Amino acid sequence: MKVAYTGWTWLINHKDNHKWEFEQFLKEVSEIGYEAVENFAFITQPDYFDNNAEEVKGLLDKYGVEMVNLYHHYRDDYETDYSKAVAYVEFMKKIGATHLNLQGNMWRDKPHERPIDKKRIEEYAELSNKIGKLCTENGIKACMHPHANTNLFTEEEIDYFVEITDPNYVYLCLDTAHTVLAGMDPVEAYAKYASRMGYVHLKDVDPGVVDPEWPMSRFLPLGMGTVDFKGVYNSLKDGGYDGVLCVELDRPYICNYKSAAISRAYIKSVLGL
């Protein structure tokens, strides 16, 4: 399996310095020992690289890492969401990316947990099938990421989405921490959805409630919480998964570099990767 790290948390500090921050991200994670990276698709936008795939690819080559994934956030404007996917796919082909993560529109107001909205899931399924077909035709996997504070999060919601999407076009990107927040056992979840697994996010979870106002504040570097990553890894292997394991941490512990280093050391010592 290929070990990757996500870069968006480097690119949110200095509005006029994003290119430097992106290069610093690549420099740091390559030094730590990651062989691949992912980023939110905002790197294509004018404030970042303005769709300059050659410049991005040049930096990736400079530090010897592969960009395996871009991240497409739905905004519930499905025509625009699809047109953005078309542009992202063209950009991804130029830089060699192989996965497009999809995520439902996220809310920040309470209540954080809401009843299943089958109509919204059906809309996401229709759009994801369309984007998934586009991706497949271009050698890319479209992977829906169940995520807290979206309409695709709980086991019930994932089950319905899986049922009504085409397995030839739409895969899943399960996240160990979000499965915990959704009340699932990650080891069992990765085994259950093995046949649809296209990409994997890893992060740990504090067993306590650090900030009840924002559930995702519980996320930690690997090995600092309670997730059974060895069990998750075994579930993936048993299910035939041999893809990317991408570490992500929304709120860095101390700093981005330290968080990435803690998780890389854990993966090497515990998973042997």
Image (cartoon, rainbow, N blue to C red):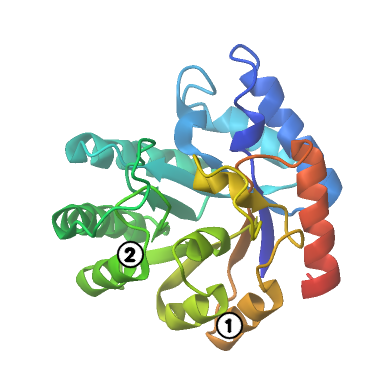
The percent position of residue 8, horizontal first and vertical second, equals: 59, 36
The percent position of residue 128, horizontal first and vertical second, equals: 27, 55
Q: Is residue 134 visible?
A: yes
Closer to us: 140 or 125: 125
Residue drawn at the location 61% of the way across and 76% of the way down: 232
Q: Name the residue under label 1.
A: 235
Mark 2 neighbour density, 10 Å: few (under 14) some (14–19) many (20 or more): many
| Horizontal side of residue 134 vs 201, given as left or right | left
Q: Tell me the amino acid under the disc marked 2.
A: Val
Q: In which quarter of the image is the C terminus?
A: bottom right
Q: Quadrant of residue 85?
A: top left
Residue 220's tag is none
Residue drawn at the location 58% of the way across and 42% of the way down: 211
Foreground: disc 2 or disc 1: 1
Q: Tell me the amino acid under the disc marked 1.
A: Ser
The percent position of residue 66, horizontal first and vertical second, equals: 65, 49
Q: Name the residue under label 2.
A: 170
Closer to us: 205 or 268: 205
Q: In which quarter of the image is the N terminus?
A: bottom right
Mark 1 neighbour density, 10 Å: few (under 14) some (14–19) many (20 or more): many
Q: Is residue 93 visible?
A: no
Find the residue positioned furthest to the left: 119
Residue drawn at the location 64% of the way across and 47% of the way down: 249
Q: Is mark 2 on a helix, strand or loop?
A: strand
Q: Which of the two discs, 2 and 1, labels the residue nearer the N terminus?
A: 2
